Structure formats: C-alpha cells, structure tokens
Image (tube, rainbow, N blue to C red):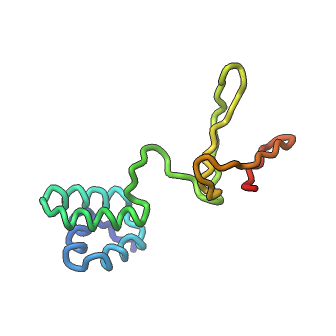
Amino acid sequence: MGKKRIDHREVQLKFYNEGVVGIEHLLNEGVSDYVFKKALSQIKKSGNMRKAEEFSGLLRRYGILTNRQGPKKPVAGDVRRYRTQDVKGSLFVRLPVHTLGVENGEEVEVRFLDDSLQVVVP
C-alpha cells in the first residue's frame, strides 16, 4: 500500500487542532512544499493573521517558505552546473559561496588547477 496523499485542508486542520507539533510530523513525512504553501494561503484568506504568522514562521524554519525566487541555495555535497558569462572579452563563472560560511566582503582563495577551480576559505 502506498503513502497516503495529504492535501492542504488536512494540513490546515492538523495545524488548528494540534499546532506546531502536528505540522512538524507532516514536515518529516515528506509532504510536498506546495501543499504547505497552499495551506498557508488558505489560512491567510481566513483572516486569522496570528495563525498565519505562526504557520509561516514554521515554514521558514524548515526552509519551505523563503523570500527567494529561483533554485534553492546549494548545500555541501550538491553538484551544480553554471554557464560561463562573457564580461568584456573574458569568461567568468558566478558562484554562490554562502555554503562556505563567508560574509559579504570577506576574501576567499581560488586555486586554478589544470581542469578545475578550488575555492577555499583561508
């Protein structure tokens, strides 16, 4: 027998009846992000802004709700492909380095190897 499909109404009811504990259980069960986002939009439509804020805070803690658009931030172990960009006749690659734990303005060391680049925090 396959996994039971959960829809946004069930998520809403579980949140209203069991609170954060019930939702954390669903988050660990692998329910899709879309279902949680749909439940949040329905909670907002109901006008209960206190509950909506509580629910959106929970989704932010689990990385489901972000202010970002596009692909998720890479984490250690991810493999990504990036296109080169021509800037005034030279080719560049823009790489996100937040996973290295650096802040804006900090220096990183880039080692140019035969067929690769290695980015290291000194």
- Residue 28: x and y in percent read 42, 73
Identify the residue at horizontal 63%, vertical 38% (top origin).
94
Quadrant occupied by the C terminus: bottom right
Where, by quadrant of the figure, is residue 41 drawn?
A: bottom left
Where, by quadrant of the figure, is residue 95 drawn?
A: top right
The residue sitting at the left extreme is: 47
Number of marks in the rendered image: 0
- Residue 21: x and y in percent read 32, 79
Q: Is residue 66 left or right of residue 99?
A: left
Identify the residue at horizontal 18%, vertical 61% (top origin).
49
Q: Is residue 81 left or right of residue 67?
A: right
Q: Is residue 62 left or right of residue 79?
A: left
Q: Is residue 110 above or below residue 86?
A: below
Q: Is residue 116 above or below residue 92?
A: below
Identify the residue at horizontal 20%, vertical 72% (top origin).
13
The residue sitting at the top extreme is: 89
Where, by quadrant of the figure, is residue 87 drawn?
A: top right
Quadrant occupied by the N terminus: bottom left
**Along the viewing direction, whichever of 35 and 51 lies nearer the viewer:** 51
Identify the residue at horizontal 26%, vertical 56% (top origin).
38
**Along the viewing direction, whichever of 46 and 11 lies nearer the viewer:** 46
**Along the viewing direction, whichever of 29 and 58 lies nearer the viewer:** 58
Q: Is residue 29 above or below residue 105?
A: below
**Along the viewing direction, whichever of 111 and 81 lies nearer the viewer:** 111
- Residue 35: x and y in percent read 31, 59
The residue sitting at the right extreme is: 114
